[in-house]
Image (cartoon, coloured by chain):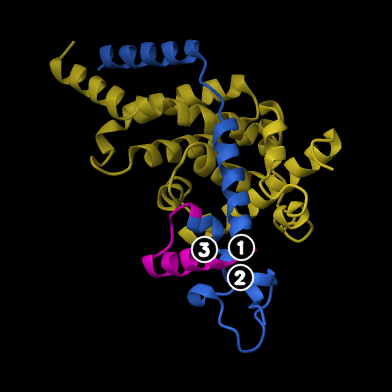
Amino acid sequence: MTAFWKLGKWKCEAGGTPPGDIDCASVVAQLYEYIDEELDEETVKKIRVHLELCKRCYPHYDFEKAFLRFLSEHGRISTPPELKRRIFQRILEEESQG
Amino acid sequence: MSEEATRKRQEFEREALVHLDTLYNVAVRLCGNASDAEDLVQETVTKAYRAWDTYERGTNCRAWLVAILRNTFINQYRRESKRPSPVEYESVEETSVFESVQDRDPEGSFFRYIVDDEVKRAIQELPEEFRIPVVLSDVEGMSYAEISEALELPVGTVKSRLFRGRRRLQQRLYEYALEMGYIR
């Protein structure tokens, strides 16, 4: 019998131990923290092992990573150069006023 | 002009003004328009300069600045405009879009067709509670601890707002991609 994670099912079937000793639901719930590198070492290790073996969670991880990369590349608004100039000017004025 | 004043200005430029882009990005997301955002940034920087002696050296300057910006916004700008409406926590879908696209586009390549203006609009449409953590994390690359300091929120709250904000944003961009026919 193929293990549940290879079938890509959500819930652990009785008796099966999910890879990394962590089930799909917990992995998915912590994917952002995993990508953000905000988890403790032990959890990171479990999730890494899980992702290597789970046919369902790995693409999900990839998808969330692509989404966050997309945001970081397209969400930025650049500061108007005129505002920068005014601010440096303002600080110079503040300096001269003591 | 005293040497000390010059030293202070130079230090401020080096330590604080390198974060101008972050301040402007957050200001636009708070104010919703460029002109108020510029005023808010100017005011924040002036305040920060005057309070520079109270800044604890070696602590996180960026978080310190964002906190000043946010407090200035709350005290001055929000009074004039309407307060944000409370978040309707239950009514919004917060499942991952991956569930909907895994058979058609598991790699999320549809994101690439979405233009920057639409991304910005979608971010702006997020409730403020979610919008600012998402901008600080995903645009500015701040850590949870930094965001927690800047917004004066527990790390756990930052975490959950980020989670929900990202999911909402993802959903919104997916709906847009569907409308535009970027994904079928």
Q: Which mark is residue A94?
A: none
| Crowd class of label 1 (few under 14; some 14 to 19; many from 20; radius 10 Å) | many
Q: Is residue A61 above or below residue A46?
A: above
Q: Quadrant of the N terminus of chain A?
A: bottom right
Q: Are marks 2 and 1 on the same chain?
A: yes
Q: Residue at x 49, y 66 (%)?
A: A47
Residue indicated by mark 2: A24
Q: Within the magenta stretch, is there residue A44?
A: yes
Q: Residue at x 60, y 38 (%)?
A: A70
Q: Which segment did they paint magenta?
A: A35-57
Q: Which of pointers 3 and 2 lies earlier in the amino acid sequence?
A: 2
Q: Which mark is residue A57?
A: 1
State left or right for residue A63 relative to residue B17.
right
The mark lying in front, picked from 1 and 3, is: 3
Q: Within the magenta stretch, is there residue B19?
A: no
Name the colour assigned to chain A in the rendering. blue
Q: Are marks 3 and 2 on the same chain?
A: yes
Q: Amino acid at mark 2?
A: Cys
What subunit carries mark 1? A
Residue A53, image x and y in percent? 55, 67
Q: Secondary structure at mark 2?
A: helix
Q: Is residue B39 above or below residue B91?
A: above
